[in-house]
Image (cartoon, grey):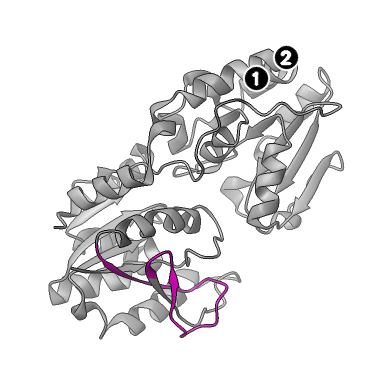
Amino acid sequence: MRVLSTAWECPDEPYGGLGVFLSHFLPEVAKDFDVVHYCLHGASPPLKPRDFRGVRVVRLHEPPIDRGGGVLNLANAVLGSALLSVIPAFDVLLAHDVHSSTAVVVAGEVGVRTGYYVHMFTASPTDIAAVAYADVVMANSRLTASQIRGSVVRDVRVVYPASPYPPASEPVRNDNEVPVVAIPSRFQFNKSPTHVVRALEEVRRRVRFRVVVFGRGAEYYSLPPWVENAGTVSEDVKVRLIKSSDLVLQVGFPEPFGLVPLEAVALGVPALVSRASGAAEVFPEEAVYTPEDLPEKLTQLLGDRSVREGLWFRERESPIMRRSWRDVWAEVREAVGIG
């Protein structure tokens, strides 16, 4: 069986959570079937297919999708036009997010079975069309599924992701002079650290700590001078910054799921997750915050290492941390009815 996968991100140079997801998910699919992945954002020269852990990756010419409006239409035009004659040669299409929505519609027209995995629902006309055309629609959380059902009446299967790293057996114990709060982010309004600045300022009147912000485009945020902004960093530096912190704060208002807390806990660092995120569905209640109760939670956690470690151990034992990428693929395969 031949499986075609499509997404804006390529798996070999993750831009964000979708790229990280694909870098772990697609190799599992390739263990069972012949997989070709078409994408736009990556490190390799375009139109030069290469192998990524058993997956044949074809990167197309990337439009200027980081700038201004028309992002969705540009990406759809590039992927859709390139795949018009390609899709009929495959048995199944696994399409990820709105950039692949035109491909989903084409697959529906030519009779190729399609699973549409929605990591972030935009409610745009093309996104709604893809939801309508796909044989099976999947979402990365109940939150995302409810957003989809708010626009289209149909069944949506929730398939949670897994941890990008094997979970540590013990928490990281840093010797920081004062506790360090890491805020991995990306330059998007819903992920902006500005959502929690007021709460952080309140806690600073009670406890001494540092705040470090980093992520794709984070250098463009306008933040108070007491916030250390490391800007755009590589995956290796991201891991180092997380492991050198005492607490990771996920910012998402909303956040469809957010792999950041899974990454943090797997690396040995406790995490707090926004109530308005899919991760809040699978993490312990004491790890979930709102802007109103964040100051109290931060004060308790930053004031006592044992409280932070207690939270980490409870998070480490969450069922989501025992989940594997093989489990993710098995659920997708069963939902789409592949083989």
The answer to whether 170 is drawn above or below residue 73 in the figure is above
- Graded by Cα atoms within 10 Å as few (under 14), some (14 to 19) or many (20 or more), the crowding at tag 1 reads many
Q: Which mark is residue 227?
A: none
- Residue drawn at (50%, 43%), measured in percent from left and top? 258
- Residue drawn at (61%, 31%), measured in percent from left and top? 268
Depth check: 21 or 173 in front? Answer: 173
Residue 157 part of the magenta segment: no
Marks 1/2 in contact by CB < 8 Å: the verdict is yes
Q: Is residue 222 visible?
A: no
Q: Quadrant of residue 13?
A: bottom right
Secondary structure under the numbered disc 1 in the rendered image? helix
- Graded by Cα atoms within 10 Å as few (under 14), some (14 to 19) or many (20 or more), the crowding at tag 2 reads few
Depth check: 109 or 38 in front? Answer: 38
Depth check: 121 or 236 in front? Answer: 236
Depth check: 91 or 210 in front? Answer: 91
- Residue drawn at (54%, 72%), measured in percent from left and top? 65
| Residue under numbered circle 2 | 304
The answer to whether 66 is drawn above or below residue 161 in the figure is below
Q: x and y percent of residue 52 in the render?
A: 45, 67
Q: CA distance from mark 1 to mark 2?
A: 7 Å
Q: Which kind of residue does numbered mark 2 sit on?
A: Asp
| Residue under numbered circle 1 | 308
Stretch of the chain drawn in magenta:
33-55
160 relative position to 253: left or right = left
Residue 38 part of the magenta segment: yes
Q: Is residue 11 visible?
A: yes
Q: x and y percent of residue 326 in the render?
A: 33, 46
The answer to whether 43 is drawn above or below residue 128 in the figure is below
